[in-house]
Amino acid sequence: MNPSPSVELAHIPVLPTAVLEGLAVTAQGTYLDATFGRGGHSQLILNADPSVQVWGIDQDEAAIATAQLQFQGTRQRLHLWRGNF
């Protein structure tokens, strides 16, 4: 099956402040999102500082294909792999 990525399938985290405070995102930091999904948490991290890097892992090929479109503006800072944590 060939995935049809859709930018409309974004994940919106319900506790964005708690996520950012818990991670204590800092400049030049590197963060791992081992359950990337639709990238809601990764988007929060990427938006927190323009110098952070995020490494995302997801076993769903459609999620990775969607992220290629959804994260076009930050693709140089987002590194995705297909896999299972």
Image: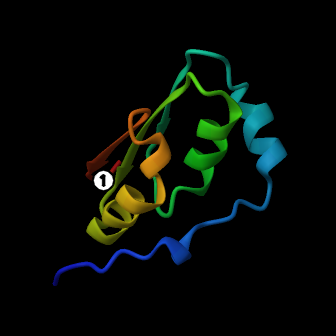
60 left or right of 9 in image: left
Residue visible at 73% across and 25% down in the picture: 24
Q: At numbered mark 1, what does the secondary structure look like: helix, strand or loop?
A: loop
5 vs 39, nearest the viewer:
5
50 vs 52, nearest the viewer:
50
Above or below: residue 39 compared with residue 45: below
Residue visible at 46% across and 54% down in the picture: 36
71 left or right of 81 in image: right
Above or below: residue 51 compared with residue 11: above
Instruction: Return the residue found at the far right.
Output: 17
Residue visible at 71% across and 59% down in the picture: 13
Instruction: Return the residue found at the far left.
Output: 1
Q: According to the image, label 1 marks what residue?
A: 84
Above or below: residue 55 compared with residue 27: below
Location of residue 66 by image quarter: bottom left
| Residue 50 horizontal/vertical position (percent) | 60, 27
| Residue 21 horizontal/vertical position (percent) | 80, 33
| Residue 6 horizontal/vertical position (percent) | 43, 76
Instruction: Return the residue found at the far front.
Output: 73
Amino acid carrying mark 1 in the image: Asn
Q: Quadrant of the N terminus?
A: bottom left
| Residue 23 horizontal/vertical position (percent) | 69, 30
Instruction: Return the residue found at the far bottom.
Output: 1
62 vs 51, nearest the viewer:
51
Q: Residues within 10 Å of mark 1 (few under 14, many from 20)?
A: few
